[in-house]
Amino acid sequence: MLRAHAEQAYAHELTALAQADDRPRPPRWKLSPWAVSTYLLGGTLPDGTVITPKYIGSRRLVEIAVASLATDRSLLLLGVPGTAKSWVSEHLAAAISGDSTLVVQGTAGTPEEAIRYGWNYAKLLAEGPSESALVPGPVMRAMRTGGLVRFEELTRVPSDVQDSLITILSEKTLPVPELDTEVQARRGFNLIATANNRDKGVNDLSAALRRRFTTVVLPLPDSLDAEVEIVQSRVQSLGASLELPADLAALSEIRRVVTVMRELRSGVTADGRTTIKSPSSTLSTAEAISVVTSGLSLATHFGDGRVGASDVAAGLLGAVVKDPVQDAVVWQEYLETVVRNRPEWDDLYRACRELDTDQPAR
Ligand SMILES: Nc1ncnc2c1ncn2[C@@H]1O[C@H](COP(=O)(O)OP(=O)(O)OP(=O)(O)O)[C@@H](O)[C@H]1O
Ligand SMILES: [Mg+2]
């Protein structure tokens, strides 16, 4: 498999946690809230099993998220792109209900059927509306099993479709008028939604819907070290699954990539002395992860296996320059005023200039 679901990839950790866990579990939860937050934040169990941290950040935020899911309130993970909203929602679903695959992917074209149910039209025409002609959507399936359903990018969905969630979340029931019945949610049913708070073209949630959610805002990592740790641990596990030998010497390169991202994102250099322009693109931790991963691939296949400046330069340029006109100016200015003046970054400066054949080095 190219990518295993969280409950498959971390099956051994989930099993060990379930064995060690003697705290009370809410109805149909595979683990207690304590074990779920240990699964997300990492730790060592009494039998010596090491639980790797999945989310690196505030413990309290994770506790608030888990505690909310243990009540009848749903959870809304909000944040700028690349702050691990989808990642956290997948791991929460895997740890709580052992199944992270009940997902509605929200888009501007998500129809109401994607949330509720659809029909097998051949059967519907042959037999008329019947239970066997009904095709339940992820939300209906989670209601029937008392599990968790994930709703990705909730704010991209048209408002009328969003609002069809209100009855489901407050009455915990989904009417099926065609069959003159309803599906009542079993205990344990809940929903985790994710939404981006910076995207253009979004449909804000109505106050009525928002009230049904506990909102947890996932922040960008607050320090360079925390962000380096996130990138390093993700690159290591991605490298392993892509069979790219993880190169620990890449650490200094990771620190440099993350520094570039953080400086451009915040508009000021790490020492606070020079202000710089920020590009139009979002430079999230996720971008840093993909710059380093593609550097690892370049180094493995076309270099000596050690990630160096020339392996990350192309990725950096691609991540920063999304708008070929404005961002290119921002990047040039950053190269000339910041990168060039750091003697220990000389290799990076030269590697970036080489990519840019239009501009002769000054
Ligand atoms: N604090 C963090 N701890 C652990 N991993 C993180 C953290 N921040 C970002 N990541 C990593 O960043 C990557 C991107 O995360 P993810 O796709 O979940 O972002 P997202 O918030 O859903 O973004 P989008 O709004 O674009 O959907 C994941 O691989 C995740 O592991
Ligand atoms: Mg996402």
Image: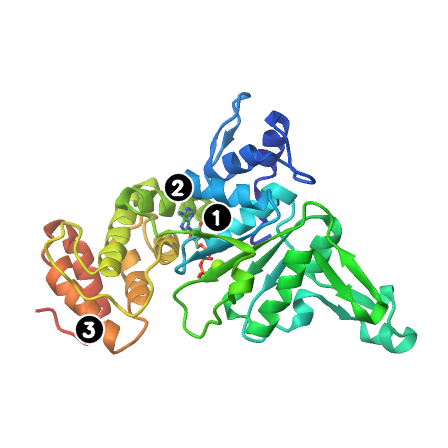
Please name the residue shown 65% across and 44% down the image.
97
Residue type at tag 2:
Ser
Look at the numbered disc 3 and say if its residue's Cβ is closer than 8 Å to ligand 1: no
Counting from the top left corner in percent of width and height, residue 320 is at: 29, 66
What is the secondary structure assignment of the residue under circle 2?
A: loop
Residue assigned mark 3? 329
Q: How many marks?
A: 3
Counting from the top left corner in percent of width and height, residue 73 is at: 58, 50
Residue assigned mark 2? 58
Residue type at tag 1:
Glu
Task: From this view, report whether residue 279 is shown above or below residue 223.
Answer: below
Answer with mark 3 or mark 1, whichever residue precedes in sequence. 1
* Camera-side mark, 3 or 2: 2
What is the secondary structure assignment of the residue under circle 3?
A: helix
Q: Quadrant of the C terminus?
A: bottom left
Residue type at tag 3:
Val
What is the secondary structure assignment of the residue under circle 1?
A: loop
Counting from the top left corner in percent of width and height, residue 307 is at: 31, 50
* Camera-side mark, 2 or 1: 2
